[in-house]
């Protein structure tokens, strides 16, 4: 696509991303049909390294929820889940995923030629992001007669202390014990250390990828980020994710060196706080592109940029990094993080997405947007929407609000 402002430069690595995704899902499908392999389901910031080290193939259902949203089918599937008692205003990843199972449809069928998500032998969660995941997994645990196990760390944490880390480490040890008992297997700590090192390496590369948007013009946008973050979630702990991010980083660094921006003739830089609006990612990307405004940074994409592993105790690293994630922190810590991000990425204004079915990853409900406006002295806009459910989103109203906001940025700069 091109505009009067210039021609968009595509990210070349995207072709490899498509291949990686296909390989990943086809292999998961094969694993589910192979009695010698085991499939585990895991939350996106859950203890997947333990599962990988114990020989499980790991599937992440939140990605399926996002895919259903991106394919704009969630609103047709959610009523199915509502029909069996799930609230219409509860997590739309969960309700659209359960709805897709009840309807027997999945975007994985068309995208990768497989029947759908693999059947789990165990479902593992970490409630560091929300309690919804536990209830979501419960549906499948009952359906498939599979055990649902997980950890419940302290939430709304300010400073993460040694006591917090020690408690969560204990929870992880307990989880390992339950898996060992259920599957008659043993966790090899050296193997876990190896997987954690790979995971941390992929995560560090992902952070460097996101940091290329600190350049002026930004080498990538939030809308690129939500596509290219797939390997750091689905394949972390593997060499594939590392190789992918090395190639992507090299490409983006080249952009930085040559002064090529993701949005040509970049005028303004915006921060996106909250969940993506999956069914509208493309339209929003086009809108900002036409406004010559780059959404340069987000809380969401940073959720998988963990602190680096120093080679010590892998369980402690897992305990610390999974407790430290933004969504699990108190208001004060979140505010400090956001102000640093606005400053570090040279942001002109921030947009808070009030995602109706995800209060957990929405930070505009307790005065944060106003406090950020006061502290950063930058314009802030709150938009109503949802991660997947289009009933809560008005395209016309949101686009008008965004246009007016960008006008405000121009005024503000003057
Ligand atoms: S964090 Fe929000 S979107 Fe993600 S699983 Fe929990 S409720 Fe759903």
Image (spheres, rainbow, N blue to C red):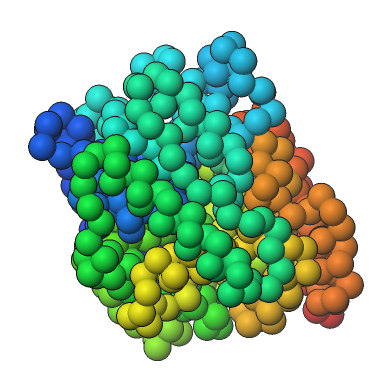
In the picture, which quadrant includes the N terminus?
bottom left
Q: Is residue 352 visible?
A: yes
Q: Is residue 183 left or right of residue 406?
A: left
Q: Quadrant of ligand 1?
A: top right
> Which is more toward the observer, 267 or 23?
23
Q: Residue at x 71, y 69 (%)?
A: 158
> Which is more toward the observer, 357 or 42?
42
- Residue 190: quadrant of the picture: bottom left
Examine the rendered structure and indicate whether residue 109 appears above or below residue 320: above
Q: Residue at x 60, y 41 (%)?
A: 131
> Which is more toward the observer, 354 or 393?
354
In the picture, which quadrant includes the C terminus?
bottom right
Q: Residue at x 15, y 39 (%)?
A: 37
- Residue 214: quadrant of the picture: bottom right
Residue 314 position, x and y percent, is: 36, 70
Residue 104 position, x and y percent, is: 36, 16
Residue 378 position, x and y percent, is: 81, 73
Q: Residue at x 79, y 53 (%)?
A: 364
Examine the rendered structure and indicate whether residue 359 appears above or below residue 139: below
> Which is more toward the observer, 248 or 293?
248
Q: Is residue 219 visible?
A: no
Residue 130 position, x and y percent, is: 61, 45
Examine the rendered structure and indicate whether residue 174 appears above or below residue 83: below
Residue that protrudes farthest toward the top in the picture: 83
Q: What is the tally of numbered marks visible in this picture?
A: 0
């Amino acid at each position: 696509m091109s505009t009067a402002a210039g021609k968009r430069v595509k990210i070349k690595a995207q072709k490899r991303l498509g291949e990686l995704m296909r390989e990943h899902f086809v292999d998961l499908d094969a694993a589910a049909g192979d009695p010698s392999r085991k499939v585990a389901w895991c939350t996106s910031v859950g203890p997947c390294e333990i599962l990988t080290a114990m020989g499980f193939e790991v599937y992440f259902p939140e990605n399926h929820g996002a895919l259903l949203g991106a394919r704009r089918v969630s609103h047709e599937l959610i009523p199915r889940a509502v029909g069996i008692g799930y609230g219409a205003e509860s997590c739309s990843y969960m309700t659209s995923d359960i709805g897709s199972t009840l309807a027997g449809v999945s975007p994985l069928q068309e995208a990768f030629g497989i029947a759908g998500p693999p059947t789990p032998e165990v479902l593992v969660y970490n409630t560091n992001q929300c309690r919804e995941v536990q209830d979501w997994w419960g549906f499948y645990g009952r359906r498939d007669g599979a055990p649902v196990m997980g950890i419940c760390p302290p939430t709304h944490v300010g400073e993460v202390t040694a006591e917090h880390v020690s408690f969560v480490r204990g929870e992880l040890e307990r989880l390992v014990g339950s898996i060992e008992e259920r599957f008659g297997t043993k966790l090899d700590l050296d193997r876990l250390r190896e997987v954690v090192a790979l995971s941390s390496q992929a995560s560090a590369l992902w952070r460097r990828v996101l940091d290329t948007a600190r350049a002026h013009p930004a080498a990538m946008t939030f809308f690129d980020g939500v596509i290219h973050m797939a390997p750091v979630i689905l394949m972390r702990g593997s060499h594939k994710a590392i190789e992918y991010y090395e190639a992507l980083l090299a490409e983006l660094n080249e952009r930085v060196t040559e002064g090529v921006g993701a949005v040509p003739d970049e005028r303004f830089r915006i921060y996106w706080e909250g969940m993506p609006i999956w069914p509208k990612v493309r339209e929003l990307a086009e809108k900002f592109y036409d406004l010559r405004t780059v959404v340069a940074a987000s809380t969401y994409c940073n959720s998988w940029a963990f602190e680096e592993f120093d080679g010590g105790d892998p369980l402690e690293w897992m305990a610390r990094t999974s407790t430290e994630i933004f969504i699990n922190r108190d208001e004060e810590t979140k505010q400090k993080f956001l102000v640093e991000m606005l400053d570090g990425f040279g942001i002109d204004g921030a947009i808070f997405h009030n995602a109706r079915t995800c209060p957990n990853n929405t930070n505009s409900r307790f005065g944060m947007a106003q406090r950020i406006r006061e502290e950063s002295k930058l314009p802030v806009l709150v938009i109503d929407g949802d991660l997947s459910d289009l009933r809560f989103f008005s395209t016309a109203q949101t686009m008008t609000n965004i246009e007016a906001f960008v006008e405000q940025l121009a005024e503000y700069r003057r």
